[in-house]
Image (cartoon, grey):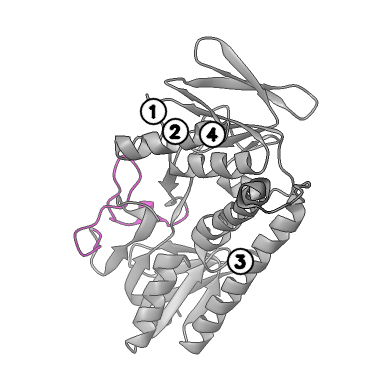
Amino acid sequence: MADQFDLVVIGGGPGGYASAFYGASAGLNVALVEKDTIGGTCLNRGCIPAKAFLETAAARRHVEHAAEFGIDAILGSTDFAVAQARKQKIVDGLVKGLTGLVKAKKVTYLLGVGAVNADNSVTVTAADGTTSQLSGRNVVLAAGSVPRVIPGFEPSGPVMTSDEVLMLDRIPARIAVIGGGAIGCEFASTFADLGAEVTILEGLPKILPGLDADLANVVVRSFGKKKIAIKTGVAVTGHKPTGSGSTVVSFGDGETLEVDAVIVSVGRRPFTDQLGLGNTKVAVSDRGFVEVDEYCRTSVANVYAIGDLINTPQL
């Protein structure tokens, strides 16, 4: 028999845990289903880790330019393993805090993959394959998003997405960033400040295409000072490993670039893969977003979708 809840939330990221906490605060009996670690991409593989590395890069930049402020400082090497450990300590502390809130608000927490059934019940599959059934008067889909990949540039070896980049314990000497959006530019800036030779490869006529042109130009000038190479209007066509750890990226009109790491940063897609929506009448757009109205209601009564699953600006 399925466990009964007023609200079942699938996904423990910012949207998911906030929904669970608000529901619990309103007196609802809430279940929160998360397949990995509470906090989602933002806390574990996105915003927070990236900002921790930005802070490391800023500290190095301040030391590098200390003489301009009358400070005699010697810029030594950067031990990125230490920066990685610092980042993980920050993440672990925040995860611990959220875990405490789950208990304090008496939210039932289930570790596993949540999938919606035709009757709006939810099946939770744990890592060992065991399943449990939940029945909720309301279901919130908050499974988030995952990095998009380019054919031929699947994560492996020197090719990585944001997920892999944020687990590095060393600084690659030469980096190609495919994609000049916000995330790609953030990584480019971080690693340039940490001493890497960085090249941005962008298919559109300019980087940061969603930004006001004047603001984007400020970033371009800043990147010039950081010696970040920017190549726009180019399409990547593939890459060939050298056998020594590096790879040669082909792009544009027969141009090539040998690098030690390729960061694929071409946006994120909604992660509906394991939600079981094919067994339901929840409408999904051609681009993979769950379709909702202005109240985040899906096409199925009492089933809602929020966050990166729907076509709104992503966190």
Residue 220 is tagged as 2
**Distance in Å between CA atoms under marks 3 and 1:** 34 Å
> Looking at the image, which residue sits at the far right?
244
Badge 2 amino acid: Val
Horizontal side of 299 relative to 191 (left or right) equals left
Residue on which the image places disc 4: 225
The relative height of residue 28 versus residue 232 in the rendered view (above or below) is below
Badge 4 amino acid: Lys
Q: Are marks 1 and 4 in contact (CB under 8 Å)?
A: no
Badge 1 amino acid: Lys
* Magenta-tinted stretch: 274-298
Q: Earlier in the sequence, mark 2 or mark 1?
A: 1
Relative image position of residue 61 (x, y in whole percent): 63, 48
Residue on which the image places disc 1: 206
Q: Earlier in the sequence, mark 4 or mark 3?
A: 3
State which quarter of the image contains the C terminus: bottom left
Residue on which the image places disc 3: 91
